Image: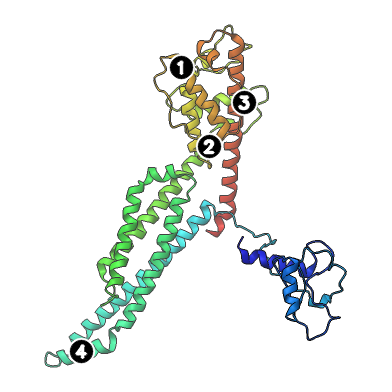
Amino acid sequence: MSLGSIAHLQYYFARTGILDGKGGQLAKDTRKSSASVSIPLVIPADDMDLQRFDDIGIESTGSPAREDDSSDEWDSSLMLPPTVSTYSHKTHYIAPPPDAATLRKDLQDGLAQVTQAVAEVSGRKKQALTQDHEDESVEDQSQNYLSKNQSLQGSSPSQGWHQLEGMHILDVVTLAIRSAKIYYTMHEHPQRLAIIKSERQIREELLSVLDVLKRMAMRNFAGGLKDEELLVVTVWVQGVEDFLDKEKNIEEREARDREKWQWLEGDWVGRDRTREWLFMSTFFENDHLPEWTSPSEAERLPTPFLEALRNGLTLVNLHNRILKQSKRQFGEIKTFHTDTAKPYRAAENIRYWIKAAEIRWEIKLQVKVMGVVYGQDEDVWREFDTAILAWCRAVREEITKEWKQGSMQVSAQEPNI
C-alpha cells in the first residue's frame, strides 16, 4: 500500500471515528472563532510541533491518537463520505461453454452465409458479362468503342462498390473461419475428428483461405473479386460441409452400436461380473478376455480372468481406450511397460492403473501389488478381483451417464438446427 493511501485512511478514520469509536478527533470545532484555521494533521506530532502552530496563530487539532481531544464536540455534517469501494459483491453469471450441437449450428450458419454471399457475387458478375455481350451484338462495328465505354461507365460497378462487396465477403468468411476454429478446438471427441481429417490438413485449409483474404485486402479489392479467389472459398466451404456430414455418419453409427450393447440397460442383479465382463469386452473387439468367474466359485486361484490381468498391461490399455470415449479426457497412462517378463514391470503397470483410477475416475483401490505379481496368497487374488469389479462399476456408470446426457442434449436441440 502506498504512503498516500495510508494517509488517506488515517484522515478518514480520524474524521469518522471508526478508528477508536470515540468520535472524530480531527473534526473542526464549531465553538471556536471562525478566524482560526483548523489544519488536520495526518502524521502524529509531539507537543513541540503543536506549540509552533499555536505561536503563529493557527489552531492545531492534534493527532488522531491523542485521547485528550476525545471530549470535543464535532459536527456530524462535516464527516467525509466513505470512498467508493472497489469490492463488488454482485454475483456475476458465467455462461457454461457451448455444447457440440450449438457449435455445429454456429458453423453451419456461418457456412450458409458464405455460400449466399459468394453466390450473389458470382451472379452479379455473370449478369455484367451477359449485358456486355448483348451490347456488343446490338451496336455496329463503327460505334463499338464508344458504346462499350458508355456501357462500362453506366453498368460496371465502381471501385467503391468493389470495396463494399469485398468487405462483405471478408466479414462472412472470417466469421465462418472463427466458428470452424472454435468447433475444432472445443470438440468433445478430437480423436473422431482425426479419423476424418488430420489436424495438419485442417490447418492448411484454413491458412489457404486466410491467405486469399489477405491478398484481396492488400490490393484493396481492385477490379472486384477474382474467379480463382471465389473458387478457393467455395472449395473450403464444401470441404467443411463434407467434414460435418462424415462426422454425423460416425455419430449415427456409434449410436447404433450402443443400442446393441446389452450391459447398458436391463436387470443384472446377481450377475455383476457378467455385466462388467461384457463392458470390458466391448473395448476389446479383437482381443478375447476369459470369462469372469467369482473367486468363491473357482476351484483354484487365480482364475483365467485374473491371470490375464495379472501383468497390468490389459488394465492400462482398457483405461486408455475407455478414456477416449469419455468427455473428460485427462489422466491417460502414457508411460507403461509392454514387456512384462520381469515382475517389477508388471507391478509398475498395476500401480499406474491404480493411480490413474484415483485421478480420473476418483476411485481409491486397495490392491497388494507385489502379492498379485507373485500370486502366492488367495486373499490377495480376492482383493484384486474386488478392486477390478469396483473399478468397472464406477467407470461404466460414469460413461453411461455421459452418453445419456449427450443423447438428451442432441434430441432437445435437434429441431433448432
Label 4 SS? helix
Q: In the rendering, at what x and y percent does residue 129 appear?
A: 24, 79
- Which residue does the image show at 38% across and 55% down from the upper left? 240
Mark closest to the chain's N terminus, 4 or 1: 4
Name the side, left or right, on which 271 lies relative to 130: right
Q: How far apart are marks 4 and 1 (CA)?
A: 89 Å
Q: Can residue 99 be seen in this view?
A: yes
Q: What residue is pinned by disc 4?
A: 149
Residue 258's tag is 2
Name the side, left or right, on which 156 lies relative to 104: left
- At label 2, which amino acid type do we have? Arg
Q: What residue is pinned by disc 3?
A: 390
Q: How far apart are marks 2 and 4 (CA)?
A: 68 Å
**Vertical position of residue 212 compared to residue 410: above or below:** below
- At label 4, which amino acid type do we have? Asn
Do the residues bearing badges 3 and 4 touch, measured as CB atoms within 8 Å?
Answer: no
Name the side, left or right, on which 345 lies relative to 67: left
Q: Distance between the residues labelled 3 and 1?
A: 25 Å
Name the side, left or right, on which 248 lies relative to 94: left
Image quadrant assignment for residue 382? top right
Disc 3 crowd rating (10 Å Cα; few below 14, some 14-19, many 20+) is some
**Vertical position of residue 134 compared to residue 294: above or below:** below
Q: What residue is pinned by disc 1?
A: 344
Q: Nearer the viewer, residue 140 or 36?
A: 36
Disc 2 crowd rating (10 Å Cα; few below 14, some 14-19, many 20+) is some
Label 3 SS? helix
